[in-house]
Amino acid sequence: MIVGALSYSRLLDVCELTLLDLRFRARPIQRIDPQVVIVEIGNDTLANLGYWPLPRDYHATLIKVLSDCGVKAVVFDVLFSEPAAGDELLLEATRRSGCVYFPYALEPEEKKGGLWQAQKYDTPLLPPLAETARGTGFANVLTDIDGKRRRIPLFINYRGKLLPQLAFKAACDYLALKPEEVRYFPRRFVQLGDFCRIPVDEEAAVLVNLTGNWEETFEHYSYYDILVAYAKAEGPSGKGRPSELARLKDKVCFVGLTATGTADLSASALEPVYPMIGLQANLFNSLLTKSFLRRLGRPANLGILYILCLVTILLTLKTRPLPGLLYQLGLLASFTAAAFLLFALAGLWLDLFLPLLICLSVYLGTTLFRYIKELHRRQLLEKELSIARDIQKSFLQELPQELAGVSISVQMATAHDVGGDLYDFVRFSDGRLGLMVGDVSGKGIPAALFMAQVISKFRYYARISSAPDETLTRLNQDICGGRKSGLFVTMAYLIYDPANVELSLASAGHLPPLVFHNSQLIEKIEVSEGIPLGLMDGANFTQSRLKLQPQDLVLLYTDGVTEARDRKGREFGEEGIIGAFGHRPGLSSKQAIQVLEDSVSAFVGRIPQHDDITILTLRAI
């Protein structure tokens, strides 16, 4: 409803007219009938003849000269409303010529049925001139809301009688049209017999088809130069008709003011200063060349607008943001190009500003709707992820800080809301303690779900197997047997015997644990033939044993530690782990984790964490 109201009311026509002017300037010079010429009362004429208004005898002389040159019509855009000296000469010249047209100005009061209504003259024509002239017509021109003159009404209803516009009247006579052949169809067109049909708007006005800039169109003659040429030809040494005026034969001459600062200059679609006589000549030229401009009707413009809005909504909703933006810009660019081409080639004026404005508004509104919808979806997802994070944490046991003969600590930091790292511990009845650290391939929710499954299976097999290699072998067979996700997991599983201060270790493709004594690396526990769990059914795993010394620190970790990167893309690596514990003897298991976390954080700076980090430490007491 809002779009329809804006389109039908044309409230934004001041912007639409600006884009119309751009189309006028972008198109090439239009076809010009060579019979149409301009006689300018310009700066040179007023400078040489002295003042305005010019004496009537000058006009009489001009009419005589042009008649002698064989012109077909002389159309004055000069008002003669009051008697003055030289009227007799002007009347006589007009009578002898038989092809002179004079204007008058009406005072329109209101519009009725689309036509302007007038009850009186604003500037009447002297009755003797009206009776003597070949024809008369009003010189009124419509001024648009931006102050420019683009339209001329062809008729004004004066006390129940349709009076014609000056150039329109001259053109009808030039084409030898009878009065009954000129028919007006309100709000649609004016039919000129079988010659042509003139499209008009609601005010019976025609959009003037300006052929080009003032200096570049029509053949121009100076009023003063014509009089001078005639005076020289009529003088003692003259030879009759001046040869430089011979080209005026069979022309239609439009006579009017073009001098700087006069009231007959106003803004047009092409130039900020354009003479009124130019509008008259352009209207006459349009009628002779049958080249008219037509604005598309309100229903058609509204239909195009609704189609563009629909396409905009579909493009925005059915495509991703960046392609959608490119498609939208392409749509608007194509429509703009089509509007310019239709105006240049067919004289069809499509509304352009409102469709561009509405389509951009619809695009922004639809994009905002998608953003709000996506934001709501993400809020729901974050809520679900928060629940998933809590559920995932419930799968991870809290490790006891102190046990007989050993101190253990663990810390996990996920890169996303949920992660794929895992750890667990098992207490055996004989006092031994099992510790496991693993890393699921991938990230996010799939890895978290797989991690929960692996922990559940690990706890089962760790209880029924007393050796790490047996546990990993059975766990691998179970995972491979029900493997559908395509995920796998690396795992390091050790069993610590506090009675003998001894480690038993098996690895499924995981990073080797490190053993430190007084902050110095003394062992990197390598286990051969370990492949990630879930890759190959029937895989075998081997077991290694290591004797520890009191106060030895065992470190298990995931690749989120070693693969942490700084701004230059360098990895923290195993060297970073060894360097973090340098010259720091006597660290507890908890302190060791804190030292390593601080070292990693200082190394990466503000670079976001890209992988899950899990650190588990064991210190023999």
Image: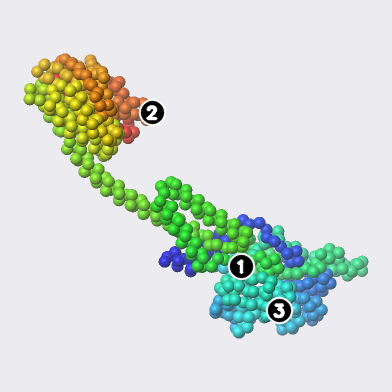
Taking the image as shown, residue 322 lies to the left or right of residue 572, namely right
**Residue 556 drawn above or below residue 105:** above
Q: Position of residue 459 (x, y in %)?
A: 15, 30
At numbered mark 3, what does the secondary structure look like: helix, strand or loop?
loop
Q: CA distance from mark 3 to mark 1?
A: 24 Å
Q: Position of residue 413 (x, y in %)?
A: 24, 33
**At 27% across and 46% down in the image, what residue appears?**
381
Residue 486: which disc? none
> Which is nearer the N-term, disc 3 or disc 1?
3
Which residue does the numbered mark 2 point to in the structure image? 568
Q: Position of residue 289 (x, y in %)?
A: 70, 66
Which residue does the numbered mark 1 point to in the structure image? 207
At numbered mark 2, what does the secondary structure look like: helix, strand or loop?
loop
Q: Quadrant of residue 449?
A: top left
At numbered mark 1, what does the secondary structure look like: helix, strand or loop?
strand
Taking the image as shown, residue 588 lies to the left or right of residue 229, namely left
Which residue does the numbered mark 3 point to in the structure image? 178
**At 44% across and 64% down in the image, what residue appears?**
3
Taking the image as shown, residue 96 lies to the left or right of residue 17, namely right
The quarter of the rendered structure image containing the C terminus is: top left
**Residue 534 drawn above or below residue 324:** above
Tell me if label 2 and label 1 are in contact, CB under 8 Å: no
Amino acid type at mark 1: Leu
Taking the image as shown, residue 132 lies to the left or right of residue 467, namely right
